[in-house]
Every structure is written in C-alpha cells, then in structure tokens.
Image: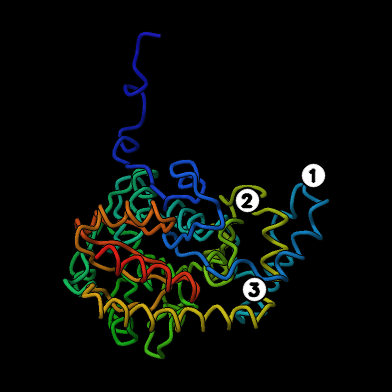
Amino acid sequence: MNNKIEDIVRQDIKKIAPYVPGKPIEELQRAYGLGIEKIVKLASNENPLGPSHRVVEAIKRCADKVSRYPEGSGYYLKNKIAEVFNKPTEEIILGSGSSEIISMGMEVFINPGEEVMYPTPSFQIYEILAYKIGAIPVEIPLKKDFSYDMNMFLERITSKTKVIILCNPNNPTGTIIYKKQMDEFMRQVPDDVVIISDEAYREYVDTDDFGTAEPYLYSKNIIITRTLSKIYGLAGLRIGFGIARKEIIGFMERIRPPFNTTIPAQEAGIAALDDKEYINRSFENNIKGRVYLYSAFDSLGIDYIPTYANFILCRIPNATEVIKELEKRGIIIRDMFGIGPEYVRISIGTEEENLLLVQNLKELL
C-alpha cells in the first residue's frame, strides 16, 4: 500500500480529539499497585452508592437470556418510562446512553455544512458528533461565572443554524438555565431550529426555578435527553432515553441501530425506575455531600462553582501536582485543564469518600 491512511480519512474526522473519560479504577491499580477497596473514584459523576439491590437482582434474573437478542424496541422499559414520566410510549426512544439519543437527533435534522450550536465549556461529545456528521460546530461561551448567556445563543443564530444543544444542568460547571431564561429563549428562537435539551442531571436539581424544556415539547421542535446512568446508578449498562413529539421520534426510530440496548440494561432500567427509596437516598446523599464539600472548600480556600448536579467544578492551586498525589493515595478526580490550568471537577461521593478526599486535600494544600 503506497497511500497513507491519513490521505483517505474524512477531513472532519481529523478535527476530532478523542473523548478522554475519567481515569478508570483499574488504571490506578496497575500504576500504583493499590487494592480496589482502597480506591475512591470521584471523576466520572457516577452514583457513589453502587447499584440498587433491585437492579442487581434484575440482572441476575435475566443472565440466562443474554445469548438471545433483546426485544428491539425495549417495549417494557418504554412502558415503565411512560408511566414514571407521564408520557405516551410513542414519544419515547431508547438509546445506549443519552449520547446516542443526541447523536440520532442530530443525524435526523442536520445536513452537512449546517450549524449546530452548543455551550462551552460543556460536554465534549457535542463537538465530536458535530464533526462526525459534517456539521459546523458553533460554540457559545458561558459567562465568566459559568452561567448561561441565552441572548448570545439568539444573537448567533444564522440561516445555517439547524440544532441548538442545551446542557442543563451543564457538565462540567453544574450551572442551569432558569425558567425565565428558558421562557425568553423559547419565545424568540425560530420555529425551524431544533432544540436538544440534554437533561442528564435533572434528578439532582433542587430548585423550582429550573428551566426544563419540557413545557415546549408540543410548541417547538424539542428533543429532551435523559439518562439512567446518573442518579439511577446504571452508568456501566449504557441506557438512556429521549422524549419528543411522536413525529420526531418516528424519524429517529428510522436510524436507531437495531438492538441498541441490551437485555440487562432494559431489565435493570425497569428495576431502577421502580426503586423510589434508592432514588431518594441518592438525592439526599448528594445534597448532604454538597453541603459538606462547600464548607470544606471554603475552609481550604478552594474556589468552586455552586452546582445543581452531582459534581463540583473547583479551582485548586497546583492542580496537576495535587491530582497526581491524590491518585497515589487512591483518589481519582477529573482535571478540567481545557477550562484553565487549575480547574478540576470533583464528583460528590459517599460521606466516607468525601471525608477522605477532604482529609487528603488538607494535607496536600
């Protein structure tokens, strides 16, 4: 072969920086020889309580079915979602995590050369998916305090704007769009623009002033993406869902990959949605942990952004060294050096995990 692979790869793909997930526990085990019981992962916004016991039992019950393909549409899980979220099943679509729902939504509506708009800093997958389908990514910066500037979204709309993605609460800042902001935005956004509202962390929000896109499902072109990876504790099973008008869902179903959600994911999803006690306990753990970490960060002089999610964006002096030293001690947090050299994102853990983190930060700082 005489030609280089770079010569035949699509140009848009060359623009993509691969997504880098939070460092896995296994990597720390290999690097420092630590036992798994001594490692605390506060890097990937997972539920620190572990899976619900109902989920574990559901997975065990379906283990002998995994030699078969799953029921393609996820009939029973869709019916459970419809029941819990009070939506018709024809307005629900399942995906391998909410990222796949976002991807399908973009693929249905965006032609190559059209624009997709999203906040920055935010979830890196938006840029990756834009380049993947040949769209033009348009980044809208958050304000200096990392709050949303919805007027800037409106000002940047052009005749090429096809999709606007709103991450609400936003990852990695934990900030939200408030009701008044959302109302004003929806009143002015053109009707031919599709809004994808990524509400993966919505279950952690504890204010009535949260500006979900849900009230506009039937008056605008809206796709709301949700996930069972966060408060429901199913990150390792990759299961999410989208809510939209049935006409939109119908087109998304045309490109949904066959068997895109597994039998264990579907069964676990039903069990997770049914376990209200676990969901409430996860919510309360997050509130309690957030209060504790705010107080600890204040005493340590660590700047942070108030959050409505299950993580906190912080500025830590000498962050590179601190991250490395924490890893040696078995604690993983996530660098956010794309925002600035001292920014880190810390997931809220259990009471014991939060205490261990703070004790080590006191020693290191």
Q: CA distance from mark 3 to mark 2?
A: 17 Å
Judge depth for marks 1 and 2 and give the one in front: 1
Nearer to me, 284 or 97: 284
Q: Which mark is residue 81?
A: 3
Is 185 placed above or below 242 here?
Answer: below
Amino acid type, mark 1: Ser
Q: Position of residue 116 (x, y in %)?
A: 31, 56
- The extreme front residue here reads 363
**Where is the C terminus found, in terms of image quarters?**
bottom left
Residue 324 appearing in the image: yes
Q: Looking at the image, is mark 1 or mark 2 earlier in the sequence?
A: 1
Image location (x, y in percent) of residue 189: 29, 73
Q: Which one is earlier in the sequence, the residue at label 3 or at label 2?
A: 3
Q: Position of residue 136 (x, y in %)?
A: 28, 49
User: What amino acid is at disc 3?
Assistant: Ile
Q: Are marks 3 and 2 in contact (CB under 8 Å)?
A: no
Q: Which mark is residue 260?
A: 2
Label 2 crowding class (10 Å Cα cut-off): few <14, some 14-19, many 20+? Answer: some
Reply above or below: 7 against 22: above
Q: Which residue is mark 1?
A: 67
The reply, left or right, for residue 105 in relation to residue 163 is right
Label 1 close to label 2 by CB (< 8 Å): no
